[in-house]
Amino acid sequence: MSFDFDAFFEKLDARQIKAVRNFALDKSNTFHIGGACAVAVFPKTELELCDAARLAEEYGLPIKVIGKGSNCLFYDGFIEKVIIFTRDLCEVTIDGAEALVKCGAGVSLVALSRMAADAGLGGLEFACGIPGSVGGAVYMNAGAHGGAISDILVCSRALDTESGEIVTLSAQEHGFDYRKSVYMQRENLICLGASFKLFGSPKSEIEEKMRENTQKRRDTQPIDAFSAGSYFKRPEGDAAGRLIDVCGLKGYSVGGACISQKHAGFVVNQGNATFDDVIRLEDHILKTVYEQTGVTLQREVEIIR
Ligand code: FAD
C-alpha cells in the first residue's frame, strides 16, 4: 500500500502546522535508537493536533502519537507513519483550593510533580523520576513507589480519530489495571490532556518523599544510560529483574545492547545498539528465563515500526 505523505505534508505546511519530512527519531526517544519516520508533526496547540490527526485520517495515513519516547523501541529503518509529538502541549493549570491539576498531554511528569510540590499538593511524588509525558503515562497507567496514575486521575480528554470528536473519559472509563488503560485497547484515542485530584500537604513532606524516591532510583537503576526503563512487565508475584538476575544474565550483551549491571530489568543501549541487537537480546532473555524458571516474561516497552 502506498501512502501520499507529500500531499499530507503540503496541507500541513499550508495550515502552518510544524512538520518535518523524513524525521530522524533516534534523538527523540530515551533509548536513542531509531530510523526516520515519513512525517513528524509538532502541534503547538490541541487544535493543531486535532487538525493534523483528522487530516492524516482523511488521507488514510497510519498515525502514532509520541510523548517523550521513554517507553518505546523504534525500528531503525524507515517507519512509514505520521508521528505526532505532543511535546508542545504543555499547559498546566493548578487550582490550589480544589487540589486539582489540569494539564496538556505533553507535560513532563517530572516537571508536573515539581509544580505540584511547589503548590503544596501531594499525590504526584511517585512520578518525580518517571521521564515520560502525561499522555504516555495515562496511556500505560505509569506507576512507581506504590503509586500510579490511576490513583489520581479524575478524567482525560481525547480526540477520537474515528469520529473526529473530542471526548472526556472519566476515571472509570479508563479501565485501568497494571500498565493498562483504554488507550492501549483503542488505538483511535489520542490523549489531549488530563485532570488529576491531589491533596494539600506540607511542601517539606512532599519534597522529602520526592528526595527518597529519587535516591532509590539512583541507587538501583541505570538512570543515566540510554534505555526505555523496565524492559519487561512485572510477572505476577515476582520481578522481571530478579528473574533475569538469577539466570546469570546481568551484563550479557548482543552488539551494543546490554542487560544493565545495576538493574537486570533494564536493557541499555551502550551507544551503538541497533534495533536488531535489542530484539536479539530480548529473545535470549525470554528463552533463558523460560528455560530456567518456567516464567514467560512480557515486554513492557512498545515496539514502533
Ligand atoms: P511514549 O514512550 O512517548 O509512548 C508510549 C506509548 O504511549 C505509545 O504507545 C504512545 O503512542 C502512547 N502515547 C504517548 N502519548 C500519548 C497520547 N497523548 N495519547 C495516546 N497515546 C499516547 N514507567 C513507569 O510506569 N514507572 C517507572 O518507574 C518508570 N521508570 C522509568 C525510568 C527510566 C529511566 C525510563 C527511560 C523509563 C521509565 N518508565 C517508567 C517508562 C516511561 O517513562 C513511562 O511509561 C512513561 O509513562 C511513558 O511516557 P512517554 O511520554 O515517554 O510515552
Image (tube, helix red, strand yellow):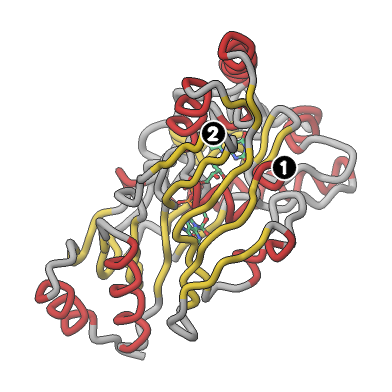
Image-based side of 169 in relation to 37, left or right: right
Cα–Cα span, label 2 and label 1: 16 Å
Res. 272 visible in picture: yes
Please, what secondary structure does the residue beneath circle 2 have? loop
Which residue is drawn at the image coordinates 28% and 60% (left, top)?
A: 36
- Counting from the top left corner in percent of width and height, residue 35 is at 31, 57
Nearer the camera: disc 2 or disc 1: 1
Identify the image quadrant of residue 281. Answer: top right
Instruction: Quickly name the residue at label 2.
Output: 130
Image: 252 above or below 55: above
Circle 1 sits on which residue? 151
Q: Residues within 10 Å of mark 2 (few under 14, many from 20)?
A: some
Q: For this view, does 112 lie left or right of residue 146? A: left
Is 201 situated above or below 254?
above
Q: Residue 18 appears in which quarter of the rendering?
A: bottom left
Q: Which residue of the protein is positioned furthest toward the front in this rendering?
A: 97
